[in-house]
Each structure stands twice: as C-alpha cells, then as structure tokens.
Amino acid sequence: MRVSYIKLADCSGCMINFLDVLSLDYIELVYCPNLIDNRTLQQADIGFVSGSVCMEFKEHISILKELREKCRHIVTVGSCACVGGITRFCRGDQLPQTGHKTFLPVSEVIEVDYAIPGCPASTMILKKFVEAYHKGNEKYLLPFKNLVKKKRASGQDLQDEIVSAGLCVGCGMCALSCPVEAIEMIKGLPEVRMDKCIRCGTCYFRCPRNFLKLRKENAEVI
C-alpha cells in the first residue's frame, strides 16, 4: 500500500506516533520530506496530513491540493488537522505587529475522506485504522469517515453537547484522555477548566456517548 505523509503546522507529536505504522510490512512510504529524501509527490493509495493549514503560507495550500490529486484517499491526523486544534485559537508572529497568521483545519482547503483526532493521535488507533483500511473494513472506518463532518471540538463542546444534555454516564474517559489535565471529575461528572483547555477536542472524541452516534451510517455531526 503506497502512503504519503505531509506535516503542516503542528508540534510533530502526531508524526512521531505515526512512525510505528511504517513497521507494517505492506506499507510503502513514497513521500514524506521529514523522513525520506524524495521531494516529489507521487501517486499513492492514501495521504496522511497532520497539522493545521497556515493560510498565509501558500506552499501549504499548493501541496495539499497536489496531494488531493495524487491520493485515492486523504486522512487528517490529530486535532490540529481535523478541527484546527489549539492553532485555530492562537496567532502566529507573537511580537506586536499587524500581520498575524490564520490557521484552519485541512478540510477547509481540500476534501478529506477520514479524520483521526487526538492530541496527539494515538499510535494504536493509527495502526488499527491502517490495518482496517488495508483489509477494506468499512464498519471500523465509518466513525473516522463521519468525524470529517465535525467542524469544531473542545471541552466546552463536551459540556454543551454531552454533559448538559444529560447523556454523560460519568465513565471518566474524558478526564483520562485530556493531555493537559483540564478536566476534573466532580460528583461523578466532568468539569472542564477552560483556562487550561487547549481546544484539541480529545475529550470529545474519546467520549463513548459521542462515539456511539458516529457508528451510524448517516450520523448527524455538528
């Protein structure tokens, strides 16, 4: 299976976790400037993208469009690529000046087929996704296909759509998965400290209540 990988604006955590995927004997990495010498995009079965798109950096936009043309399917890896993550709520060029950067999720620029969120995306989930894709296991891939429709995700969305809606069962998965420990379980329910939340959406995506609806063919995703 021919694979391409592009890293945009992110911390490299997702790419590091992706390295384990390369140990699968049926994977042929044909493009990844960070890992191999080839600098020319080639035809591939699947193209992975991590990091959000800096709209002022025209190279980001051009490489994404070329990747879309040369790959059968596009997969966003990590919350920055899927929904913008922390980069969507921050500004580049931090010294005082008029020019600031705009970061958007990949789906705002090109059509995306699957989304694998997380901050960073889980190595185990990445490997299982690739294995399911290789075997054509559409049932396993369906939630990742539906996640492409998700335009924003944060601890506040978890509170609004799951906890406040009375759907939370107090399992604590959100608190366990939060990479910055912004969620505390109080009287059996999660409380999100938005001053610590980096808006990666990991808690939202790991919530079992949310995941159940993603397994439906025409899942409604806000």
Image (cartoon, helix red, strand yellow):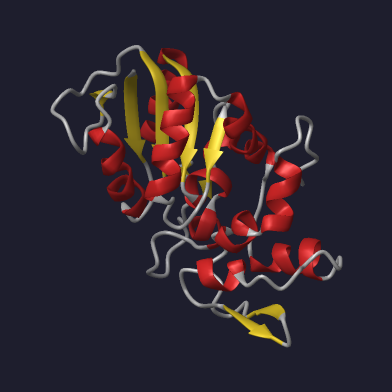
**Residue at left offset 47%, top offset 35%:** 129
- Judging depth in this view, the residue of 130 and 82 nearest the camera is 130
Q: Position of residue 31 (x, y in %)?
A: 26, 25
**Residue at left offset 66%, top offset 70%:** 171
Question: Is 218 positioned to the left or the right of 87 in the image?
Answer: right
Question: Is 37 positioned to the left or the right of 126 in the image?
Answer: left
Q: Position of residue 208 (x, y in %)?
A: 67, 56
Taking the view exactly as shown, the residue that stands out farthest to the right is 165
**Number of disc labels:** 0
Question: Is 89 positioned to the left or the right of 63 in the image?
Answer: right
Could you say which quadrant of the image residue 166 lies in?
A: bottom right
Taking the view exactly as shown, the residue that stands out farthest to the left is 37
| Residue 61 visible to the viewer | no
Quadrant of the snapshot with the N terminus: top left
**Residue at left offset 17%, top offset 23%:** 38
Residue 113 sits above or below residue 108 on the image: above
Q: Position of residue 210 (x, y in %)?
A: 72, 53
Q: Position of residue 33 (x, y in %)?
A: 22, 33
| Residue 190 visible to the viewer | yes
- Judging depth in this view, the residue of 174 and 63 nearest the camera is 174
**Residue at left offset 20%, top offset 24%:** 39
Taking the view exactly as shown, the residue that stands out farthest to the bottom is 187
- Judging depth in this view, the residue of 94 and 188 nearest the camera is 188
